[in-house]
Image (cartoon, rainbow, N blue to C red):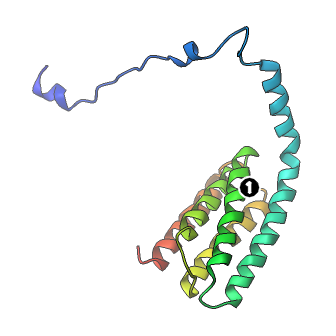
Amino acid sequence: MAEDDATLPQIINPPNTLQGKISKGGAGAVDLAALERAEQVIANLAGDYLLWAEDDLVRLEKVFGDLKANPGGSKDKIHEIFQISHDMKGQGGSFNYPLMTAVGDRLCRLVEKWEKAGKKEIEMIGLHVNAMKLIISQRMEGDGGPEGQKLLNGLTLMVNKFSGG
């Protein structure tokens, strides 16, 4: 091999061993009919997702309001915000709202190690709560397109500004 060739990337095609790991008939095989039924159940619940998300947002706003009313914030309220946003994050991707998942994940990562919340922290939480409200009120399915990307970029810029990053 020439010296110039050493700097070129090498493509390695790994073997597809997954096919050998699943049963295609008999005991333990994937039941395609059951899989289709499960997908249909999820599809039927998609309309309910928006109702669940709106209920979760009401809970999130209440806890956030309690946190704002208590300067310095309590660890318990921060933990509640984490739990609610964690649930919302988990449901978003299942019902074609991965943008909600992304914002929920960012909120979780933001607050997961906080013991208290001062003015900056409360403002950062508020930005995420408002972003989640916007996603649901505007029915921003999928990645939200260019507006969704602007939303995520804006959150990143604000968190970096507030956290000195």
| Quarter of the image that includes the C terminus | bottom left
Residue 120 in the figure: left or right of residue 7: right
Give the percent coordinates (x, y) of residue 164: 42, 78
* Residue shown at the point (84%, 64%) measured from the top left: 55
- Nearer to me, 115 or 109: 115
* Residue shown at the point (68%, 10%) measured from the top left: 24
For disc 1, the marked residue is 140
Residue 133 in the figure: left or right of residue 156: right
Q: Toward which corner of the image does residue 148 lie, by quadrant?
A: bottom right
Give the percent coordinates (x, y) of residue 116: 57, 82
* Residue shown at the point (74%, 82%) measured from the top left: 65
Determine if residue 89 is in view.
yes
Residue 91 in the figure: left or right of residue 20: right
Give the percent coordinates (x, y) of residue 118: 56, 86
Q: Is residue 103 above or below residue 41?
A: below
Give the percent coordinates (x, y) of residue 115: 55, 78
Determine if residue 126 is in view.
no
